[in-house]
Amino acid sequence: MKPTYEDLQKRIILLENEISGQCLKQGSSERMQIVQSQNEELQKAKNQAEQNERKYKMLFEATGTVNAIFDKNCCLILQNAISKRELGKGDSAIGQSVFQIFGESTGKNVYDRMTKVIQTGIPETFESLFDLPTGLKWFRSSYQPVYEHADGKIVFAVQVISEDITELKNFEFELIKAREDVDKSEKKFQQLVWDMRVGVLIQGPKAEILLSNPAALELLGLTEDQILGRTSFDPEWNVIHEDGSPFPGPTHPVPEAIATGKPVRSVVMGVYHPREKDYVWLLVDAIPQVITDGVVQQLVCTFINISKRKKAEIALKESENQLRELNATKDKFFSIIAHDLKSPFNSIIGFSEILVEQVKEKDYNGLEEYAGYIYTSSIRAMSLLSNLLEWSRTQIGRMNYNPEPIELQAIIDEGIELLTDPAKQKDITISSTIPKKLIVFADKTMISTVIRNLLSNAIKFTNSGGQVNFSSQQVDDELLVSVSDNGVGIRNQSIPNLFLIEESKSTSGTEKETGTGLGLMLCKEFVEKHGGRIWVESEEGVGSTFKFTLPNFG
């Protein structure tokens, strides 16, 4: 199952303890400061996730209907305030089965429907009468599957959204009762129609509107003169489905009820409201009333406004998607930390232990080599922590963008100096044809990060004795900067995923160097922050050229 937010919190604590414990063994106050800074960024990420969770719960409460979620054993696991009020049990209902909540008879009906949705994954809508502490009430309940994963294969819970349709059902019962006594029903029917807060239309055999109550006129934004005689086929209604696609006239509830002679219920449709200049969302029922020789001569179309509920559902879905994306990003982020921080620190600890033992035994053979390994691992860990810190800052919007005039070659020289030792170890030559006085208007920290990561990648994937070269050229109104190497190159199928966190994978270098894959994502974010683009041209066995653009500033 997908990890809960509490699971993520536990993983964060374990990770923080692991990193802190390793750094304490090293006795390095500088590294403890770096980890402390990283922990602060992790805390901010947790706070952001908690804010998203509160927003999700708020939207869950805001639907204006009974909203509850049951697990696959048909036990209540979550409910909103309206559900608590209607069930009359408050939080004590959490964990109870549908039999405990509704009793044996009603509970059996709810259980069968819920089990069907869990087994098939197909949403179902039912109308049921419930004897609740608030009285006998009719509800139209939508049973929606909740999937364990985003791929939508395994249902692990059912969300039940119940609309109180007691007033609508009472109206329908009154209509049925009225038909039993024609003389009395006419007057009573007209009065009911006129006083109903539910929109009511009486329509003829061609779906033409014969009568409308005031509520219908208000909901549709029309006058009586504008609506009488109009048919359901009229394209001026401008009706749409929930997904925004057109709703053809012949498929409307009224024409369908006329064609089949059967009621059509619970149809959600968006109808353009001319006064509001926006769509109003209606829940529509079409009920045949007068049928002669199998032909529907008259029917009643009723509808209620569910716009607030629809907007809340849309906002809830958007928030859920954002929360899912945030959790996926955090999972990836924590996975990277857990996997890639272990390697350099294990190397540092392992070779340090060897050094300590050899010094104790006054065996100085290979000390320089071991110290070199420790140095290389330390540089790798420092680069990793730097990238993680910068990446996490970009995710919470704390990375400030401060462009200024800077000399591009000077930034490249700083990057070369920082990575001199790894380049020397592989006997790699680094050169640049960029003019010394070439000035760009850019954020120094961000562009330094881009240069450092691209150069580090080039060294990583270039064999001993290879070459790396920086170059630039003017292309239209942009400056094109290239970092080329004659290394191992990249497979064509891997190129589209290089800059995506969802597909980010670290690949070992020519001498088994490791990384996180975060570097290229940082490069993409920072280049795009400048209004530029970044891409790669590569051929396996020949080498790679990473290119990025910076706009020219007057």
Image (cartoon, rainbow, N blue to C red):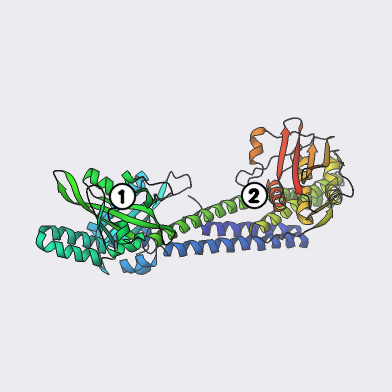
Corner quadrant of residue 270: bottom left
- Count of marks, rendered view: 2
Q: Position of residue 298 (x, y in %)?
A: 20, 51
Q: Residues within 10 Å of mark 1 (few under 14, many from 20)?
A: many
Corner quadrant of residue 303: bottom left
Q: Is residue 304 above or below residue 152?
A: below
Q: Position of residue 461 (x, y in %)?
A: 76, 38
> Viewed as shown, does residue 11 lie left or right of 139?
right
Q: Position of residue 470 (x, y in %)?
A: 83, 42
Disc nearer the start of the sequence (2/1): 1
Q: Position of residue 114 (x, y in %)?
A: 32, 51
Of residues 286 and 413, the one drawn nearer to the viewer in this rendering: 286
Q: Residues within 10 Å of mark 2 (few under 14, many from 20)?
A: many
The reply to whether residue 377 is visible in this rendering is yes
- The residue positioned 23% from the left and 63% from the top of the image is 193
Mark 2 or 1: in front is 1
Corner quadrant of residue 484: top right
- Residue extending furthest front? 225
Label disc, if present, on residue 272 of the rendered structure: none
Q: Which SS class for mark 1?
A: loop
Q: Is residue 396 above or below residue 533?
A: below
- The residue positioned 73% from the left and 61% from the top of the image is 32
Which quadrant is the C terminus positioned in? bottom right
Label disc, if present, on residue 336 of the rendered structure: 2
Q: Is residue 21 above or below residue 148?
A: below
- The residue positioned 89% from the left and 50% from the top of the image is 437
Disc 1 designates what residue?
232
Q: Which SS class for mark 2?
A: helix
Of residues 323 and 38, the one drawn nearer to the viewer in this rendering: 323
Amino acid at pointer 1: Ser
